[in-house]
Amino acid sequence: MKNFSDKVAVVTGGGTGMGRELCRQLSQDGCHVAMCDVSSENMAETKSLCESEAPPGITITTHNCDVSVESEVIRFRTEVEAGHGPVVNLLFNNAGIGGGGSFLIDEREDWEKTFGVCWYGVYYVCRAFVPMLVASEEGHIINTSSVNGFWASLGPLIPHTAYSAAKFAVKGFSEALINDLRINAPHVGVSVVMPGHIGTSIAINSGKVLGKKPPLEMGEQEVRELRERMMRTGGPMTEAMMNMSDEQIKQAMHDRQIQFRDNAPLTAAQASTIILDGVRSNSWRILVGEDAHRLDNQVRANPEAAYEPDFAGLSIGLED
């Protein structure tokens, strides 16, 4: 698919981050866009940006949908059919959150919600929309996995099980679709996207989806639980936490989320350009960022050492 002009694209998680930038760049190229998100306010901002930058006649629609809930995904599909017709050309499974890091001590609800958004969101959306891609003359599925889809870690001191398990599932599913589509729908392609640290608001948005208070609004109990969790991880943060007041901890966690978004090696716009270029070249495997390429090479070169404490030498961030 060399040209996105007059195509129809479905983008999940279109309210912020890479989802927003995908919507903007697609619409600039003359592509009609149907986005979903759990935040109407964020989607409204994305839609306004798209409409101000797109050529005349491009249709941009917004749809409230929690992709981890199949009934909402089915409603989303029905709305897209009503607004854009029965055919879709591009399906970007971009929505994702982080959470439920420890299988042993974190809340089961957080674990299952994270896994639900990051894996079942991809599965449900593909179940709903792939028939509409098959009905097209030319289609492409783009599933966002992560470097955590081939390396299930953020470093030796941070459990990262729910997100990593989901992203491994997305990667495996996408790779398995290559032959499935070649046999049963050869006009539909598939790509799996594996970003490293991209400057997005995933750290901020994940807490909202999981029902957590923003760091600056946490109460005494929330700060106590956060302090205990950070103390269990060990490392440089442990000693610092011992000497911090509750207010200092809240500010530090807030600053950490902002720095993750604003000090990343790659912006969401740059990442989206890489992804769309990969789709145009029909690449089934799209690594995003120098950190992703570096880590991929490290894991491939020495997989037995991948989970040793000194393996990566850096912490890898989440991306969506």
Image (tube, rainbow, N blue to C red):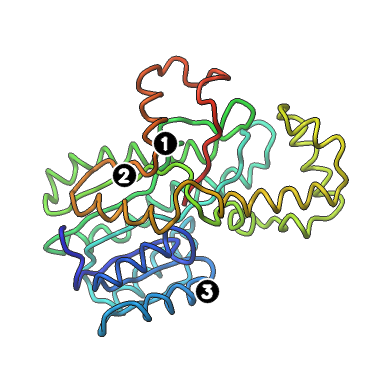
Q: Do the CB atoms of the residues marked 1 and 3 lie less than 8 Å apart?
A: no
Tell me if mark 2 has few (under 14), some (14-19) or many (20+) residues whose alpha carbon lies within 10 angstroms of its own. many
Residue that carries the numbered disc 3 in the rendered image: 40
**Residue 178 placed where, x, y %?**
21, 41
Amino acid beneath label 1? Gly
Q: Residues within 10 Å of mark 3 (few under 14, many from 20)?
A: some
Identify the residue shown where x is 38% and y is 65%. 74
Proximity of marks 2 and 1: CB atoms separated by less than 8 Å: yes
Q: Nearer the viewer, residue 122 or 243?
A: 243
In the rendered structure, which disc, 3 or 2, sits on the residue that comes first in sequence?
A: 3
Asked if residue 88 lies left or right of residue 42, the reply is: left
Q: Which type of secondary structure does the marked residue at label 3 adopt?
A: helix
Percent x, y of residue 54: 31, 77
Q: Which mark is residue 149?
A: 1
Residue holding disc 2: 192
Is 293 above or below relative to 11? above
Which callout, 2 or 1, points at the residue further toward the start of the chain? Answer: 1
